[in-house]
Image: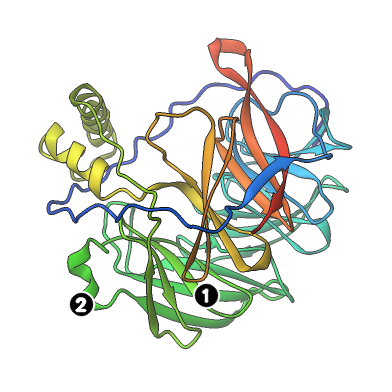
């Protein structure tokens, strides 16, 4: 742990994610928008001043209203004390043991103001105390376990992709597992499967899953939208944003991405799409319309940062409540990551100034959520 300014981070080239290109694409979702007023985001009276770490990734707002980010350069969690990054506290270090991290991009709120780090490369859950600047405890987690919401009543629920050994495979089933935060033992586990009848509608990928307070389960499913299951595992149906349209990629963009995938395949191994056109079809039709993982909001809502079509500046969020699509909320800021605690949203955004190596400096802003 250290306070104040640290030496500038060493830039690292991130691993290129390889994807298996698939053929056959479904129709675009129907047009139309909700007739009811949409959710809105207004600037909050809460502020955090200064510049966040250069390579910030994960983001969380604790129930004590402390903002923390994952610093991917140093593999540490950095928390802004008293609303000021100049007085930030760094917790953890790089490694594979307790209190050490190889992945700090997935943060969630723990009990009593703590922060949970879901460290996928280490298959470990770690709790940090921002107020004390230390690691509290660490537990082993199932492989590819992603925390799916804040800790509640001594239980943390996370999603796993069943039978997936790496990110090159196509999962059709999702497993939600509840783990005791005291013992690390599994409290319950249940599988959620896309019905066979739905798989012709491009419901091919299950991404992130989550459980709402009423026990219903949701998951991101490819282009088609958000799948829903009853607590018993019964499939309830899928809801799609009526405002979504796939982003169209230019030939130059597809060629650039294909070249990056080829370099990654040479370095890491694994399958490679056989043409830039195949990459283009994959990116346009099968990648979900959302960026990163969803966040659970007030009144059982689920918020997604959309990919957008590039026609407007700023960021847009799609908002769902169960099978109901509530609409879009927008802000003028560019958003790299976001988190919701209660009725407050925190976003990681560019500040408009340039840092070392020409990267834009990043900071955080907070917004109050208003639902219709």
Where is residue 66 shown, x and y percent of the image? 80, 45
Work out how far the residue at label 1 is from the one at label 2, CA to CA, in angstroms: 26 Å
State the quadrant of the C terminus: bottom right
Could you say which disc has been placed on residue 177 in the image?
1
State the quadrant of the N terminus: top right
Where is residue 351 shown, x and y percent of the image? 65, 21
Where is residue 354 shown, x and y percent of the image? 61, 12
User: In front: 353, or 270?
Assistant: 353
User: In front: 228, or 232?
Assistant: 228
Farthest bottom residue in view: 232
Taking 43 as reference, is 107 left or right?
left
Residue 212 against residue 288 in the figure, above or below:
below
Element assignment for label 2: helix
User: In front: 38, or 217?
Assistant: 38
Q: How is the image coloured?
A: rainbow
Residue 179 against residue 78 in the figure, above or below:
below
Residue at position x 26%, y 29% in the image: 257
Residue named by callout 2 = 197
* Tally of numbered discs: 2
* Corner quadrant of residue 234: bottom left
């Amino acid at each position: 742990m250290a306070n104040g300014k640290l030496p500038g981070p060493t830039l690292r080239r991130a691993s290129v994610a390889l994807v298996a290109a698939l053929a056959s694409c479904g129709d675009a979702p129907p047009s139309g928008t909700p007739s009811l007023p949409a959710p809105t985001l207004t600037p909050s009276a809460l502020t955090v001043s200064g510049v966040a770490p250069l390579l910030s990734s994960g983001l969380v707002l604790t129930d004590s209203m402390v903002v923390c980010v994952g610093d991917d350069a140093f593999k540490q969690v950095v928390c802004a004390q008293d609303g000021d990054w100049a007085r930030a506290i760094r917790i953890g270090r790089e490694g594979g043991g307790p209190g050490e991290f190889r992945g700090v991009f997935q943060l969630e709120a723990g009990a009593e103001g703590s922060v949970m780090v879901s460290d996928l490369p280490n298959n470990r859950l770690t709790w940090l105390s921002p107020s004390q600047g230390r690691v509290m405890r660490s537990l082993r987690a199932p492989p590819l376990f992603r925390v799916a919401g804040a800790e509640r009543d001594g239980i943390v629920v996370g999603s796993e992709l069943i039978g997936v050994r790496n990110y090159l495979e196509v999962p059709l089933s999702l497993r939600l597992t509840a783990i005791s935060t005291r013992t690390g033992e599994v409290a319950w586990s249940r599988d959620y499967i896309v019905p066979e009848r739905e798989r012709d509608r491009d419901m091919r990928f299950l991404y992130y899953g989550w459980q709402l307070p009423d026990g219903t389960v949701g998951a991101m499913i490819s282009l088609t939208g958000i799948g829903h299951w009853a607590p018993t595992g019964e499939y309830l149906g899928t809801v799609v944003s009526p405002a979504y349209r796939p982003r169209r990629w230019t030939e130059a963009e597809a060629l650039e991405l294909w070249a990056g995938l080829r370099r990654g395949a040479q370095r890491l191994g694994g399958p490679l799409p056989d043409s830039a056109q195949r990459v283009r079809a994959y990116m346009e039709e099968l990648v979900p319309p959302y960026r990163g993982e969803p966040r659970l909001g007030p009144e059982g809502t689920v918020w997604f940062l959309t990919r957008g079509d590039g026609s407007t500046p700023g960021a847009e969020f799609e908002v769902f409540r169960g099978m109901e699509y509530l609409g879009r909320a927008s802000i003028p800021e560019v958003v790299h990551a976001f988190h919701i605690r209660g009725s407050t949203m925190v976003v990681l955004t560019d500040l408009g100034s340039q840092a070392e190596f020409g990267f834009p400096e990043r900071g955080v802003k907070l917004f109050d959520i208003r639902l219709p």
